[in-house]
Image (spheres, rainbow, N blue to C red):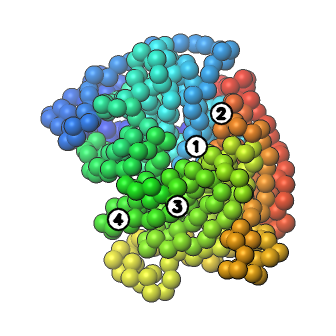
Amino acid sequence: MSFCFDIDCFKWVLMTVSSPHMSSTVSSSRGIFSPPRLGAYNESPDARASGSIGSPELETGDSEGVELLSASWNQDYGCFAAGTSSGFRIYNTEPFKETFRRDLKGGGFKIVEMLFRCNILALVGGEGNSQYPPNKVNIWDDHQSRCIGEFSFRSDVRAVKLRRDRIVVVLEHKIYVYGLLDLKLLHQIETLANPRGLCCLSHHSSTSVLACPGLQRGQVRIEHFGLNIIKLINAHDAHIACLTLTLDGLLLATASTRGTLIRIFNTLDGTRLQEVRRGLDSADIYSIALSPNVQWLAVSSDRGTVHIFGLRVRVVGEDSSSHFSSQSPAFLTQNSSSSIDALIPPSTGANPGSSLSFMRGVLPKYFSSEWSFAQFHLPEYTQFSAAFGSQNTIGVVGMDGSFYRCSFDPKNGGEMVQHEYVLFLKTDSRPG
């Protein structure tokens, strides 16, 4: 297997196998390890842990007739996972290559969530999967080619999110947050109906931030776990359709089911920092991505265009910066969004606006909108998810089994240039 291991995550596997304080059954290459208090973290009436871990039958199959059920990026956007009707596959994007695949007898997976580039994945079966039903989260260790943990719920799982110290399971009306090392239930969050499984996490070690729908239409709930702060942001009038955080969790970007405006917020105080316009007609927003340097924002929708917008935001002012840094000195790091002014070079292009924007406040809001800086056109009504790559490039994964890599001019914008196109379910670029 040519899949690369993340050393921090691989240490977790060793800790899981050897720790006597685990509150759930885990497996090692030598058998089943059953610590005391089996299933003791069953603190919720909707969830339970199980130690009945099976070793699924692997099968060797080809790509003919394989259906794509899901596609999701890992936390650094360098890989993506594809859940198929027969198993799952992992792809590297630069250069593009299938790093490994697992074809399992019994059915496919509607959720495959990676933990950076390590051997631990969270799997949720699709409808008709005889071994992995859609109401169970299976923690898969590809080092052992088997499941080492399981969470069961009374209703279908809508999403799973991972970071190095947390497992977050999203149901339609509730979110459960567990510790990754001991599988202990840490938080339960009630939400409005959330059929899309909207939830996102920060991934800096110095911050622990979660964003999800609130209990009111258009509301986003922000949990700053490290600071014990909960912030409710009334982001839109319509229901939330998509949301994302910066890696440090200090910026939030949202879109509603109308799909015309994308808004950027400070997660500490809820201030709206910027608003950009995707278009005039309503659209279903499929993905929002923020570049690692917090300089650009990418949006994909069912209108068949990936839009790139320039960001001009600063998260924390002098007063609030001193306030929050005094509570948690490690919270605002040198590389965080709070120092964004120094990250944006003067050569960065600006989003175009209407020639009548000088009449802001007199004409309708449309005339003062910021429009996209660069665009890439795709087939309409196919679900695409975009993410930033290196050197002003964008990777786009489609539910039709396609992958695009394109680039934009950071000074002049305009139409992006396509560099790569792959039908990845049919690619022969398999691991050696």
Query: Relative to 40, is 101 above or below?
Result: above
For disc 4, the neighbor class at 10 Å (few under 14, some 14 to 19, many from 20) is some
Residue 326 locus on image (x, y percent):
36, 81
| Circle nearer the N terminus (2, 3) | 3
| Residue contact at pointers 2 and 4, CB within 8 angstroms | no
| Circle nearer the N terminus (3, 4) | 4
Find residue 236 and name its label.
Answer: 3
| Circle nearer the N terminus (3, 1) | 1
Residue 54 locus on image (x, y percent):
35, 19
Find residue 12 and name its label.
Answer: none
Residue 94 locus on image (x, y percent):
70, 44
For disc 3, the neighbor class at 10 Å (few under 14, some 14 to 19, many from 20) is some
For disc 2, the neighbor class at 10 Å (few under 14, some 14 to 19, many from 20) is some
Placement of the C terminus among the 4 image quadrants? top right
Find residue 230 and name its label.
Answer: 4
Find residue 73 and name its label.
Answer: 1
Q: Nearer the viewer, mark 3 or mark 4?
A: 3
* Amino acid carrying mark 1 in the image: Trp
Distance (Cα) linking label 2 and label 4: 35 Å
Q: Which of marks 2 and 3 is in front?
A: 3
Nearest to the observer: residue 291 or residue 415: 415
Q: Helix or strand or loop: what does disc 2 sit on?
A: loop
| Residue contact at pointers 3 and 1, CB within 8 angstroms | no
Residue where numbered disc 2 is placed: 399
* Amino acid carrying mark 3 in the image: His
Identified at 45% across, 87% down, the residue is: 319
Residue 368 placement, left or right of 243: right
Identified at 46% across, 40% down, the residue is: 195
